[in-house]
Structure formats: C-alpha cells, structure tokens
Image (cartoon, rainbow, N blue to C red):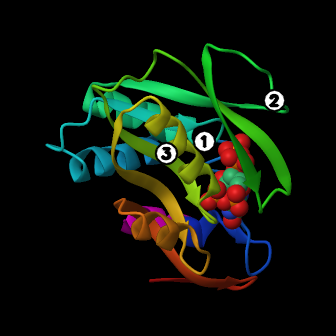
Amino acid sequence: MRLLEERILKDGTAVNEDILRVDTFINHQVDPELMQKCAKDFASHFKGMGITKIVTIESSGISPALLTAIEMGLKLVILKKQPSKVLNDDLYQTMITSFTKGTNYELTMSKGVISEKDHVLIIDDFLANGECATGAIRLIRMAHATIAGVGVLIEKNFQPGRSKLTDAGFEVYALARIESMSRDNIIFS
Ligand code: G4P
C-alpha cells in the first residue's frame, strides 16, 4: 500500500537494521485516517472469504484491527498478555517469546469468545519473528476455529515471520513489506 510506505519513509525511523520506530502514526500516537485506509484495504483483500471474527494481540494491533472489524461488520477479539501462568479453566493460554522485546508472556483468550463455527482473520501491526501470530493461531485452534489469514501493517521480510506462517499454510497479507533498512534508508519489496 503506497500510502503506508510513503508515511513510513516520511515519519518512520529505522533505529538500526532490525527495528523500525512508528511511534508518531501507529503505536504510540495513532493516525486514525491512515488506520482507516489500512482497514479498508484489509477488508477489501479478505472480502468474501467467510470471515466471522477479527482477532488481534494487545496492544498495538488494536487500532488497525478495530477499524477492520468495523469495515467488515464483525466483532473483534483482543488476545491478552499475562506476565506469568495463571491457571484458570476458563482460559486458553500459550507461551510467547518476543525476540524483539526479550520478554516471555502467556497469550490468553477466554473460552467462549471464539467457537468451532468461527473463521478468523488475525490483524496485527508488525510481522517480525511471527511469534505473536503463531501464538494467536495456537489459541484459535484450541477453540477449534479455522484461520482465514493474517493481515499486518508492516512486514519485515528479512525476519522469519512470513515463512513460518506460509510454510504452515497460512495466507499473509502485508500492507508494507520492508526488504531491508538502515538509519538513512528503508527499502520496500
Ligand atoms: P512478532 O511480532 O512477529 O511475533 O515478533 P517479535 O516476537 O520479535 O516481536 C514482538 C513485539 O515487537 C511485538 O509487539 C511487535 O509488534 C514488536 N515489533 C517487532 N518488530 C518491531 C519493529 O521493527 N518496530 C516496532 N516498533 N515494534 C516491533 P508486542 O510485544 O506485541 O507489543 P505491542 O507493541 O503490540 O504492545
């Protein structure tokens, strides 16, 4: 999506070759008009696939996911992060390791928000190592639902997230795909 690429070039900052800061328009201050256009793009791409629910992971995925849910007329489920294992029979839980942030947490979903009748679209801000998305897929499968695909605003395709997902048979749709980056140059594929 050209608009998002242009915005990344204008307002994004490559902290180093791995990390892109998008704090002024995606994950600290949010540009709602840009997010709405991104949501329309997701909705148009995933239209007609029988999707019944949108799922995201707190916190930065919420704004694009909520607007996509509005565009598609669907409910949004926000997967929660818990610092340590809280045993609870009413929850599905799976451990996530964030390579980017160097943290571990339990990704958590209440039983009952997703059922075996659901066909789910996962929306998130970044696809990097694919840990969040594969964790979300594990939880959705625990609920015996099916997965229509994964939509992300920004994919860093020099990291293994996309191949982890596509190798497992999932469709990945990214609005901006970064091939490589350095402090003064961001190259899209
Ligand atoms: P994954 O997102 O593909 O699973 O990879 P990884 O485990 O490495 O990343 C975990 C967290 O780091 C995610 O945020 C993800 O959005 C964020 N992240 C990954 N790459 C970048 C980047 O280049 N720039 C920025 N700004 N963030 C990046 P999270 O832990 O889910 O937290 P939240 O920010 O959504 O609250």
Disc 2 vs disc 3: Cβ atoms closer than 8 Å? no
Q: What are the residue bounds of the magenta stretch?
A: 1-7
Report which residue position mark 3 lands on: 137
Residue 129, x across and y down, in percent: 64, 65
Quarter that holds the N terminus: bottom left
Q: What kind of residue is marked 1? A: Val
Report helix, strand or loop for mark 1: loop
Residue 85, x across and y down, in percent: 81, 29
- The secondary structure making up most of the magenta span is helix
Report which residue position mark 2 lands on: 85
Question: Going 51% across and 68% down the picture, which residue do you hit?
Answer: 164
Residue 117, x across and y down, in percent: 27, 25
Q: What kind of residue is marked 3? A: Ile
Is the distance from the Cβ of mark 2 to the nearest ligand 1 atom less than 8 Å? no
The numbered mark at residue 30 is: 1
Question: Going 31% across and 25% down the picture, which residue do you hit?
Answer: 74
Between disc 2 and disc 1, whose residue precedes?
1
Instruction: Examine the rendered structure and indicate whether residue 67 appears above or below residue 122.
Output: above
